Amino acid sequence: MALPELLILWDVDHTLLNAGGLSSHLYGVVFAELYGRELAAVAPMAGRTDRAIIVETLTMAGIPGPRGQVDAFIAGLARQAPAYGEQVRRRGHVLPGAVAALTALGNGRTRQSVLTGNIRPLAEVKLGALGLRGPLDLDIGAYGDSHEARSELVHLARARAAAAAGADFGGESTVLVGDTPLDVAAALATGARAVGVATGGFTEADLAAAGAHAVLPDLADTPRVLAAIRVAR
């Protein structure tokens, strides 16, 4: 049997789904649980890992030694994950074309997973709540509890996929699909192919300017999605 040719790593929020705008509220719940007061502001989230967001958020809130507090905050997020998943089920939605794209790419010549700033428990409940887990091998993905820098997650996902598939996913055999310039930057920094999708807070022009190899307005046109991901490497 032929080895898989591509490792496709999907961003989660605003690429495959909209979780209903609940992330800042979740951070506030965990902050109050840990520190006994209201969280005034959450650091910018788009395209960043939870580790990076937590460090900046705690710094803004005046918490001493914020990096030393990150693991406790991540544990708090994980505790809230089941309840958060129920909220996503009620308020979130799958973005147009996501199911069709995942299904069309689900064959023996690809491996699909996620490369997301979410810690794994949150990624799992979001995807599960909205019925998107099936086509994705979450064990070979990389998550925001592993490193502050998104580019470091690419190396981790490649290593996991290589071990699982017995294949080398170096260079543009790895494809990152995401909605922010930081997704694009992570791909470019690691030699992967970058496919930008303008379904978040950034335009097609923003993603093209960031250096994406291909840019889509959304995932609604499945043949166009396949072409963007499968351009000859």
Image (cartoon, helix red, strand yellow):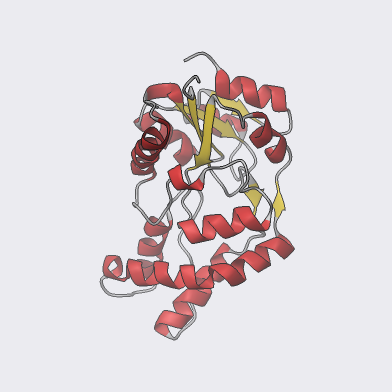
Residue 32 lies, in percent from the top left, at 47, 81
Q: How many marks?
A: 0
Image quarter for residue 222? top right
Compare residues 45 and 113 and report the one nearer the observer. Answer: 113
Which residue is drawn at the image coordinates 41% and 37% (left, top)?
164
Q: Is residue 168 left or right of residue 13?
A: left
Compared across the picture, whether 120 is left or right of 64 comes to: right
Q: Is residue 52 left or right of residue 222?
A: left
Q: Position of residue 56 (x, y in %)?
A: 37, 62
- Asked if one can make out residue 44 in the rendered structure from this viewpoint, the answer is no
Answer with the quarter of the image where residue 174 lies.
top left
Q: Nearer the viewer, residue 179 or 224?
A: 224
The residue at the point 45 percent across, 76 percent down is 31
Task: Report the residue that reaches farthest toward the top.
Answer: 232
Percent of width and height locating residue 100: 72, 35
Q: Residue furthest bottom?
A: 36
Residue 186 placement: quadrant: top left
Q: Is residue 221 above or below residue 60?
A: above
In the displayed structure, 179 sits above or below 174; it is below
Q: Residue at x 66, y 67 (%)?
A: 86
Farthest residue in the front direction? 1
Can residue 25 be seen in the rendering of this structure?
yes
In this picture, residue 39 sits left or right of residue 203: left
**Nearer the observer, 42 or 119:** 119
Residue nearer the viewer, 125 or 216:
125
Check the image and report above or below for 187 versus 31.
Answer: above
Q: Whole-percent x and y of residue 1?
A: 50, 20
